[in-house]
Amino acid sequence: MNKQEVILCQQLGSDLTGVIGRKNYDKVFILTDQHTHDLCMPVLNRANNLQQTTEITIGAEDVHKNLDTLASVWMALSTQGASRHSLLINLGGGMVTDLGGFAASTFKRGIDYINIPTTLLSMVDASVGGKTGINFNGLKNEVGVFSPAVSVLIETEFLRTLDAHNFFSGYAEMLKHGLISTDRHWSELLAFDTECIDYGRLKELVGQSVQVKEDIVEQDPHEHGIRKALNLGHTIGHAFESLALAEDRPVLHGYAVAWGLVCELYLSHLKCGFPKEKMQQSIHFIRQNYGAFHFECPHYDRLYELMKHDKKNMAGIINFTLLSDVGHICLNQTADKGVIFEVFDFYRECMGL
Ligand code: GLY
């Protein structure tokens, strides 16, 4: 996989002009969803004179991350004259960058694409690392390819208009990057004042966070080994997310990851000796900022079944990424049902349920 360029923008307009100008693209398309068409496209237009571009707008939210929407993007590219030498710019959150990346990577066997993420979650996670795809057959990201964007342009000014829930959703992935990297980055994240956001400081933290992910993806782009570190908090987090969806009380991805981190840090403590104090400090931050996901003992079996169907498993054995300390990663860990239920007990007790 080619290395992906990630630019922490000083000036979105000139950074974008520079990237587009490197190749002689015959046409430039911009993919937006209804939200980013209204809120972010005007910002991009002010930053850069994009008169020669064609905008394709799709429905917003995960419900549109499907084959029909993908086909509509292929159709728009095809009917509006996109060639192998065209460029697609994805302007949006993870749904737009995942689906747009997949559309570009498959159209005429692959055209260049650029991601301009507009949410914190997509800046620090979805838009970086070359995972593209759509939901299919009721399963998240069931069909897709690894295919990196030519460039990812991160403009943190978009974060000023992000609501608190979406801010914290992205921040959970940053916290995960802190836990898998260094004590210093982890403690800076815990110390950040999330009530009165200093956007200059946030930009620095976003830059560090993206660097953690880039370093890992560069070593293992196709997730055969160390890239699994990025799954910390996700084995149980995905089960919470799926249960919440099935019970018609959906939660944002990052919230599920934060609650998954509570469980998987405790499992890390039990199985790998993760220090208790660091576990408690992390859990305190999550409890204060994310509240708790409510579930009762009768949900344990259902959560366990959901974990058994996680696509990260091999031969039905639940696969965890755990830590023996901050930055000390233990890949391919397992735990039996009894231990997992003990983790659920711990979670409910420490979150006050
Ligand atoms: N979101 C985890 C990864 O990109 O591998």
Image (cartoon, helix red, strand yellow):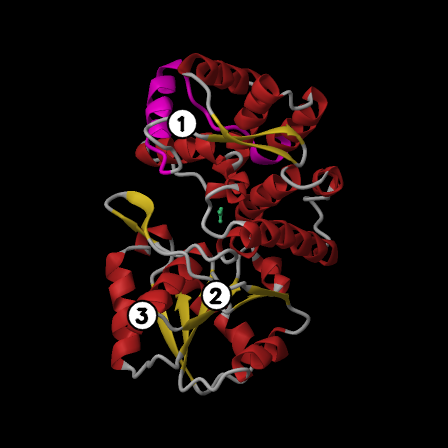
Q: CA distance from mark 3 to mark 2?
A: 15 Å
Q: What residue sits 45% from the left and 32% below the top? A: 235
Residue indicated by mark 2: 149
Start-end of magenta stretch: 288-311
Q: Position of residue 254 (x, y in %)?
A: 51, 42
Label 2 crowd bin: few (<14), some (14–19), many (20+), radius 10 Å: many
Is disc 3 placed on a helix, strand or loop?
A: helix
Is disc 1 placed on a helix, strand or loop?
A: loop
**84 drawn magenta:** no
Q: What residue sits 53% from the left and 20% below the top? A: 347
Q: Position of residue 3 (x, y in %)?
A: 54, 63
| Amino acid type of the residue that numbered disc 3 sits on in the rendered structure | Arg
| Mark count | 3
Q: Position of residue 185 (x, y in %)?
A: 72, 43
Label 3 crowd bin: few (<14), some (14–19), many (20+), radius 10 Å: few
Residue indicated by mark 1: 318
**301 drawn magenta:** yes
Between disc 3 and disc 2, the foreground one is 3
Residue indicated by mark 3: 109
